[in-house]
Amino acid sequence: MTRTPKPAPPGRDRKAVHWPARHGAPSAAAPAPRTAVVGAGIAGLSAAIALAERGVHVELYERAPVLGGRLSGRPTRLADGSTATMTRGFHAFFRQYYNLRALLRRIDPDLGMLTPLPDYPLRRRDGATDGFARLPRPAPWNALAFAALSPTFRLGDLARIRARAALPLLDVRVPRVYETLDHTSASDLLASINFPPAARHLAFEVFSRSFFSHPDTLSAAELALMFHLYFLGSSEGLLFDTTTEPFPQALWEPLAAHLHSLKARIHTGTAVRTVTPRPDGRHDLGLDGPAETFDAVVLALDPGSLQTLVRHSPALGDPPWRAGVAALRQAPPFLVSRHWLDRPVHGSRPGFLGTAGFGPLDNVSVLERWEGEAGRWARARGGSVVELHAYALDPAADHESVQQELVDQLHTLYPETAGSRTLDSRHEWHADCPLFPVGGYAHRPAATTCHPRLVLAGDTVRCPLPTALMERAATTGFIAANTLLESWGVHGHDLWSVPGRGRNRLLRRLARP
């Protein structure tokens, strides 16, 4: 019997882990199962495409008028008469996002819609700046080089680090990391390691706020998993790509065209109000019009939307599952402000800059550095398009005050912008991201439910692979689809991840409890 060779890794990390799908028929038998996918963000689109590519009849429902979920965008007319696409903010497409990139390769095998940014600089208010462009990719040399090159680390600081407390970071495994660290906050873990305060704030709190959460409330398990995914567990490096055009044009419109080519149907502006299991194993979807019956359902919703749907669907799930869904929490609000300026920012300003110590300002993007639409506007007007992000904001905060404070901090950070005139602005306030609080893993649902043909997807959902953020959304979308395909005897889709344990054998031995 000939052994099937392991496929080549999708990136540069030779230790990337291949998760092969269970073998089965190449496509669903006729009549094709009729499946509803509820939610058209990354998770829902991944599930819909994975199912449709195996001959499943897919109906994709999205409450919003556009696709993309938390990466959606809509056209807006500016004061100068031009049209721009306002999105929900910059997102980094890291090279270890193997399954998200596999999704995008459906529309371009060469990933031409992505462009690399040369560095990922992080700046403190005192001017100290860290970056990742000069670091070696393999662990642990990347961490050692970061400490050696960083202005926030001093030799005395390194000597005071409590190595024993840091050992769990050297061998992160799922789900063990949740069993050992989910009871601790990210800030308590960092304090126990005794990282120097400046380095702690810059190199770790900046990352924890990428989860739209303050480190006092974020589970240490998520912080450790993030550190593994982006740093100690992967040799892909911490640099990333972003899209060459706004998300709708670069991603969602081509993926929608791909779905249409697979005979899937997309229903935007259509809310699914209820899901009711039937005795025959199928499910009725309550819509604004007549109910629709489906052989299977994928729920790819943010926590609040999932809770609302479950609350209005009394027959859905068993009591423990419903209690777990009800216990899910959403992260505090975040703000994305975009300003079209009449003058360019200085040419030395990076395309993306993370910040620490600038009030609520978490990062600044100069969009014309990498986005085609912004670049065309900036060249035509001689100006700049600047985007400001603020995460984990007080729900009671006055919106106009926070928006103005971001501008004030921008003027401090980039003084040349103080003399610019704002030609137009747009502000996006949202509070629909999952919160991963201390002790919250026990409540998070898995992809499977007590209903064999009802599955979940999204970054809220437990994932057996070491993933986070957009990659977790894409991965759970494929896992949800594979679960249904396996139930029909159909071959699923292979997945990839960073290593599922510490990379170095000696460090793994040191990290043993």
Image (tube, helix red, strand yellow):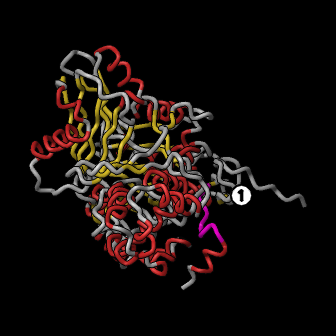
Q: Is residue 321 visible?
A: no
Please report the residue visible at 28 percent of the width from the left and 21 percent of the height from the top: 383
Q: Position of residue 394 (x, y in %)?
A: 16, 57
Q: Is 96 displayed left or right of 494 in the figure?
A: left
Please report the residue visible at 27 percent of the width from the left and 69 percent of the height from the top: 216
Please report the residue visible at 48 percent of the width from the left and 81 percent of the height from the top: 164
Residue in front for this viewpoint, 236 or 178: 236
Q: Position of residue 116 (x, y in %)?
A: 51, 37
Which secondary structure class fits the magenta region best? loop
Q: Is residue 375 visible?
A: yes
Please report the residue visible at 89 percent of the width from the left and 58 percent of the height from the top: 2
Q: Residue furthest bottom?
A: 513
As drawn, 440 above or below 374: below
Residue in front for this viewpoint, 96 or 64: 96
As drawn, 1 above or below 398: below
Picture quarter containing residue 433? bottom left
Q: Residues within 10 Å of mark 1 (few under 14, many from 20)?
A: few
Picture quarter containing residue 220? bottom left
Q: Position of residue 11 (x, y in %)?
A: 64, 48
Q: Is 431 displayed left or right of 404 in the figure?
A: right
Q: Is 489 displayed left or right of 252 in the figure?
A: right
Task: Provide the residue designation for mark 1.
Answer: 23
Q: Is 78 displayed left or right of 169 in the figure?
A: left
As drawn, 457 above or below 94: below
In magenta, the rendered stretch is 496-504
Point out the image quarter for the N terminus.
bottom right
Q: Position of residue 414 (x, y in %)?
A: 26, 36
Amino acid carrying mark 1 in the image: His
Taking the magenta stretch, the answer to whether it contains residue 391 is no
Picture quarter containing residue 213? bottom left
